[in-house]
Amino acid sequence: MRTSTWAGALAALCISGGALAHHGWSSYDSERTLKLTGVIRASGYENPHGYVDLEAPEGKWHVVLAPPSRMESRGLPERALKEGATVTVEGHPHRTTQDELRAERITAGGKTVELR
C-alpha cells in the first residue's frame, strides 16, 4: 500500500509539472497572420519552446518557436538562429502582448521550415 501511495504521488507530480511547463495557443489570434523580416537580437533553443527576439521594421518582437527537437528534426539547427542573422517569420500575434508572435514557419539561411 505504501509503495502505491508513493507511486501515485510521483505520477501526479510528473503530470502537473508537464501541465505547468506547457501552455495552450488560445492566447494567439489565429485569424491574423503576420509576416516579419528582421535581424535576430537574441535567441533561445530551449524547452518547452525556442524563441528569437527579432528587430524588424514593424518593431521589436518576441517570436515563440517550436520545441528544439521539432526544429532540429525539420532542419532548423540552433546555429541558424544566431544573433545578427536575418530571418523571416510567419505566424499569429498574441491577443494581449503587442510584441509577441507565435511562429508557424521561419525562413533562415534561405530555407523555410514549418514549425507546427
Image: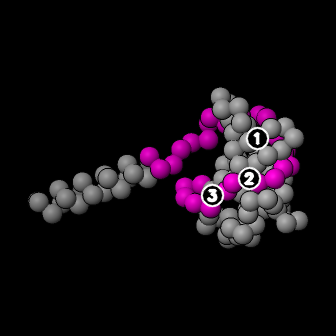
Q: Are marks 1 and 2 in contact (CB under 8 Å)?
A: yes
Binning the other alpha carbons within 10 Å of mark 3 as few (below 14), some (14 to 19) or many (20 upward) gives some
Mark seen at residue 95:
none
Query: x, y (%) of residue 79?
Result: 72, 69
Residue beneath disc 3: 44
Binning the other alpha carbons within 10 Å of mark 1 as few (below 14), some (14 to 19) or many (20 upward) gives some
Q: For the magenta stretch, what is the residue range?
A: 20-49
Mark with earlier residue (1, 3): 3
> Considering depth in this image, is 76 or 40 the residue closer to the camera?
40
Q: Which amino acid, by three-letter code, is at mark 3?
A: Gly
Query: x, y (%) of residue 96?
Result: 65, 28
Q: Is residue 113 above or below residue 23?
A: below
Does any portion of residue 101 appear in the rendered image?
no
Q: Which amino acid, by three-letter code, is at mark 2?
A: Arg
Mark seen at residue 60:
1
Q: Are marks 3 and 2 in contact (CB under 8 Å)?
A: no
